[in-house]
Image (cartoon, grey):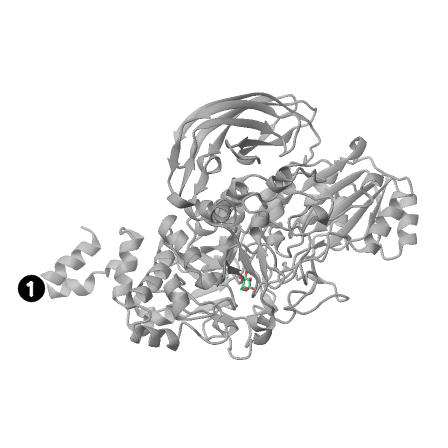
Amino acid sequence: MKRSHIFLMSSMLVSLPNLAFSAEPVWKDTSLPSAERAKALVSAMTPSEKLQLVVSHYAVDNGPGKSSVPKGAVGGAGYVPGIDRLGIPAQQITDAGLGITNPNNIRPGDGATALPSGQILSGTFEPDLAYQAGQVLGKEAFHRGFNVLLGGGGAVLVRDPRNGRNFEYLGEDSLLAGNMAAAQIQGVQSQHVIATAKQFAFGAIETNRMKVDMRIGEKEGRESDLLAFEIAVKQGKPGAIMCAYNKVNGDYSCENSYLLQLPKRNWGYRGYVLTDWGATHSTVKSANAGLDQESGASFDQKIYFGKDLKEAIAKGEVSKGRLDNMVYRIVYSLIDVGAYDHPAYKSDQAENVAADEAISQKIAENGIVLLKNHHNILPLSSQIKSIAIIGGKADQGVLSGGGSSQVTARGGNIVDHTRIQQWPGPVSYFPSSPMKAIQALVPNAKVNFAAGNDIQQAVDLAKHSDVAIVFATKWSAEGFDSANLQLSAEQNQLIEAVAKTGKPVVVVLETGNPVEMPWLHDVDGVLAAWYPGTSGGPAIANILFGQVNPSGRLTTTWPKALSQVPYPYIEGAGKIVNADVLAVKQYSSDNQAVSSVNLNEDGANVGYRWYEQKRLTPLYPFGYGLSYTTFKYKKLILEKDFDKDRHTMIANVTVENTGNRDGADVIQIYGKIPGETTSRLLGFRKVYLKAGETQTVPVPLFSVSLAHYVPVKHSWEIISGNYEISARSDSLSHDALKTNIHLDQIDVQD
Ligand code: BGC
C-alpha cells in the first residue's frame, strides 16, 4: 500500500490515530506526480512562508548598498531560505551557462570547469554534447551546494555581431539554438539542479539594456527568438525562465503579460519565471502579468514581492490564487528536477575534474571553426622544427568573456591588469596555454614566444621559425556592445607585419564575435577559437596539429563589414555604461535613456535569412567550417513522417568522405516554405565518417520549421504547396542537392 494512501485512510479512521503520525505527508511521496506533491505543499504553507519563497536575495557581498550575505547562503547570485518543517530546501542560486561562477571570490579559491562559449557549443551541432555540457554544469553546481542554475538555456538569438553577450548564446538560428538549449537544460536537470532558460526575451543588444524597448511584430517574434525559447521550453522543460532587462513592445519583459503568459498558456510550461537581477519594476503589474519570483531583490529600487505584495493581496489587487500559483510553480520545479528529494550538498571529493575538463575540451575540439586553410597549411606537421607563437598571452592561457557568466578557473584566472578591473571585468584568461599544449605535441621542436607588443621582435622570431602562429584576441562582456567589428589596430599591424615575412602564418582568433580581417588574404590559415574554455589550450593545439579534424561550424553569419548588418548604428555602443553594477544606481534603469529598437528590420529573418533577403554575400555564411577532409553529398531522398508535433519528414542524405582522413560533416537541410523568399534550417545532423566511407544519414526535419505562425489563428500551420528542400554543407553552399515535395495543410500545435 502506498504511504499516501495510509495517510489518507488514517486521517479518516478515528480509531487508528497513531497511523497518522507514522505516515509521511503527501508531498514526500515520491511515487506521486510532482504536481500533486507541489499542490499539497502549497496548501500546507502559511501566508508568510509563501511570501518567503517569491523573493531571492543577493548572496555575493553586502552590496548593492542594502543587503548582506544571508546566513545559510552558499554564496552565489541568489538565495531563498528554505522551509524546514516542510522539507523545502533553500534555493541556492548560481550563475551560469558556461560554468559555476565564483563572483568576488565569495567561496575562497573555488575554481570550476569553464565550458567553451556558446558559439562553440552550438557550432558542434551536436545536442548530445550540449547535454553533456549541461551535466557538467549540473554536477558542479550540485557539489557546491547549489540547486538553481541561472543558465543552461541561453536562447537569445544572435542578431548583431557586436552584442557583448553573444558568447553566452547559441547562434542565430531558432531551430539550432532551441534544440541545443533544450538538450543542455536536460543535462543540467539530470543532476537535480534547476536550469534556467534566459533572457526572455529579445536581448539583441546590450547597449542601454535596462531601458531599451525591443519592438517586434507578433509573427516576427514567434518565428524568431520566441521560437528558440518555445523549442527550449517544450523539449527541455526548464525549471525556471528568466525574464530580461529590456522592454518588449512597451512593457518591461518582467511585467509583460504577453511574454510571461506565452510559455504558461501556450507551451505547457509548468515551472516559474524569475527576474534578471534588477529587472523587477512593479508589484501588482508584475504579479498579475505572470512573474513568479523577484531575484536579487537588493538590485531593485525596493523589494516588490515582500510587504508590497502582501498589501496588494490584502487589497485584492493581486489574488491569493496568484501567490499560490507562484509558490506552486517554484516548489513544482524543485520537486520535478529532484532538488526536493536529493538536496544539493558540498563535496570536493565527488567532483571528477578530469572528466569534466575532458568534456569541455571535447566540445572545444568539435566546435572551433577552421575558416581558412590555404594550400592545406594545416594540420601542421609533427616534424616541424621551429614555431613562433605570437601574441594573445598564448604562453599563459586563453581569453574568456566577462560579466556575470565569468568563471574562475581552478588555480585562478590570469588577469590583465592593464585593462578594466571592475565589473564586467576584469579581463581574464583561463590558465590553459596553447603554447604549452603545442610544445607537448612536438617536444623536439623549438617553440618560442613573442608577446606581440613589440612588432619587430615578433617579426624577427617569425623570420627564424618554420611557421608563425599569431593569437589575436578581443574581449566581449555583458553590459556593453562592441563599437565595431575590429581587432585593435596594434593586433592588425602585428599580423600584417608577420605575414610580410613570407613565412607561413596561421591566425588563431579568440573573440566573442566575428571580426574584420584586413590581413585575411596575406595569411595562410585562420581558426575561430572564440572563447574556448578551461581546456582551450590543448583543444587549439590538437586542431592545429591534426590530432583532431576540425568539424565546428559557424552559427552566426560572419559579415564582411558592419554595413551588412541589420542595425549598423547602435547609439552608445562600445561604452561600458554599467561598469560598477554593484552600486544600485548604476544597475537601475534611471541612469539610462529610453530608446527603442525596431526588431522588425530583420524580424523573423535573423542571420543568414537577413543576408538572403537582402541579397548580401557575407564573408562566411552560417553553417560554414572547413575540415581536413572533404565530403560529397550524393543523394537526397525525402520520406514523409507525420509525427506532426515534432517531425514532418526525414531527409535521407547519402554522404561520402572523399578525402583521406577520418572526419565529421554537419549535414544541414534547408527549405523554403511556399510564399517565403528566405530559406530556413529544417534539420541538421553531424556524422562521423572514416576516410572513404559512405553513409546514408536520416536527418529529421522539424515540423515547426516548416510551419509559419498565423497571428489571427494564434497557431502555427504548414501550408499546402510545394517545398524545395536542399541538403547543404552551409547555408550558401553551391554543392547543394535539391528536391521538391508537396505537403498538404497541417495545423501544428501551439
Ligand atoms: C545577468 C544574468 C545573471 C544575473 C545574476 C545579470 O547581470 O544579466 O544573466 O544571471 O546578473 O548574476
Along the line of sight, the residue nearer the viewer: 471 or 107: 471
- Look at the picture and state if 358 lies above or below 416: above
Where is residue 553 shown, x and y percent of the image? 64, 39
At 63% from the left edge and 37% from the top edge, which residue is drawn? 612
Along the line of sight, the residue nearer the viewer: 709 or 352: 709
Give left or right: position of 418 versus 304. Answer: right
Quadrant hosting residue 738? top right
* Residue 262 appearing in the image: yes
Q: Which residue is mark 1?
A: 15
At 54% from the left edge and 48% from the top edge, which residue is drawn? 133
Give left or right: position of 387 versus 64. Answer: right
Along the line of sight, the residue nearer the viewer: 394 or 80: 80
Where is residue 605 shown, x and y percent of the image? 57, 43
User: Hey, which residue is sitting farthest left in the picture?
Assistant: 15
Ligand 1, image quadrant it occupies: bottom right
**What amino acid type should be assigned to the residue bearing mark 1?**
Ser
Disc 1 Cβ-to-ligand 1 distance below 8 Å: no
Along the line of sight, the residue nearer the viewer: 578 or 179: 578
Within 10 Å of disc 1 (Cα), the crowding (few <14, some 14-19, many 20+) is few
